[in-house]
Structures are given as C-alpha cells and as structure tokens.
Amino acid sequence: MRLKLLLLTGLTVGLASCASTPPAPLAGNDFVPILPRTAQNDPSVVGEKVRWGGVIAGVKPGKTDTCFHVVSHTLDDSGRPVDDDNSDGRFIACAHGFFDPSIYSVKRQITVTGTLQVPTIGKVGDMRYIFPHVAADVVYLWPKDVPMDNSGMYYGMSPFGDPMDSPMTPWMGPDIGMPW
C-alpha cells in the first residue's frame, strides 16, 4: 500500500512539473512580449521573434509554403493557447512546406514561433483587417482534448475498443452484466 501511494505521488508530481513546460520545439525565452493586436500598426517590431498561438480559422497551402489564418489567444505556461472567448487579435503565420488542411484544420489549436514580417492587408468577412505576419520556424499542432462529462468519464471509445463492446455501456441495463 505504501509503495502504491509513493508511486502515485511521484507520478502526480512528475505530471504537474511537465504541465507548465513548453514542448521542446516551442522552448526558449528570446521572444518579444507583444500581442498581435499591438503588432498590427507598429512597424518597429518587424524582424522580432515571437511565440504566438490560437485557433486556426483557415489554412492555405501554396507552392512552397502553407499559411495559417489564426485567431490569437493568450498562451499558458506550456505555450498552449488558452481556450476562452478572449482574443488578442488575428495573425497570419506562413511556414515552409505542405501542412495538410485536413489535419491542420479549422478550430484546431496551434502555437507558432517565428519572425515578424511586414503585416498583410486582408479581410475578415467584409471588414478590412491588418494581419501581423509571422514567418514561422515552428508550427506546433496541439493534440485534441478528449471530452469528459462532469464525473470525469471519457466520451467516445472505451478501453475495450468500440463503445458497444464495453461491458459498461448503458444499453445493457443496470441489472444485466452482459448483453446476452
């Protein structure tokens, strides 16, 4: 019993220490603390290195690079965008190579690091918008969150594979352990 408690405590401390550390590709502290909405009209920041993130609003692969239209969000200590209804503006991040839009899809969270370029003029709907432009060195796609209900139970696939194969599925009824 004591060994189990010690292992559980060690695991908890280990996971907690990892939670606030950015993934290796996003690590560093040489980024300027400027927000996209501030960079829109500040030509003095061109050439500065930033780490920004948010939710993908659009993806456009080109001949040699892929550009992401991102709704910016504040980053937590691990560099992951905070999932809330606040935004720091929008930005465009372009990275060399092909990033498949079916994987780097709308509503997925990304964090990029790179160098600020001259802003790009575009539109959000019919509204003219000045997009800060990042030449991205790193595009980090965050794993999808696994939805849970209020009890902490996961939705979707059970550890048994198909949810209908699980001995805990609700279609079996409360007094039947197996469906047969």
Image (cartoon, rainbow, N blue to C red):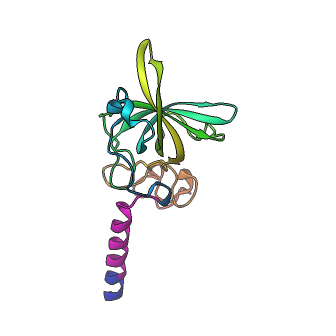
Which x, y percent locates residue 51?
41, 46
Residue occupying the point 31% across, 39% down: 84
Residue 13 part of the magenta segment: yes
Q: Is residue 126 above or below residue 11?
A: above
Which x, y percent locates residue 93?
51, 36
Q: What type of secondary structure mainly makes up the magenta span?
A: helix
Residue 51 part of the magenta segment: no
Q: Is residue 28 above or below residue 92?
A: below
Q: Give the range drawn in magenta.
A: 7-23
Which x, y percent locates residue 165?
57, 55
In this rendering, would 154 be left or right of 60?
A: left
Residue positioned most to the bottom: 2
Residue positioned most to the right: 63
Residue positioned most to the top: 126
Q: How many numbered tags mark residues here?
A: 0
Q: Quadrant of the rendered structure where residue 129 is?
A: top left
Q: Give the quadrant of the N terminus.
A: bottom left
Q: Is residue 10 above or below residue 92?
A: below
Which x, y percent locates residue 12?
34, 71
Q: Give the quadrant of the C terminus.
A: bottom right
- Viewer-proximal residue, 55 or 94? 94
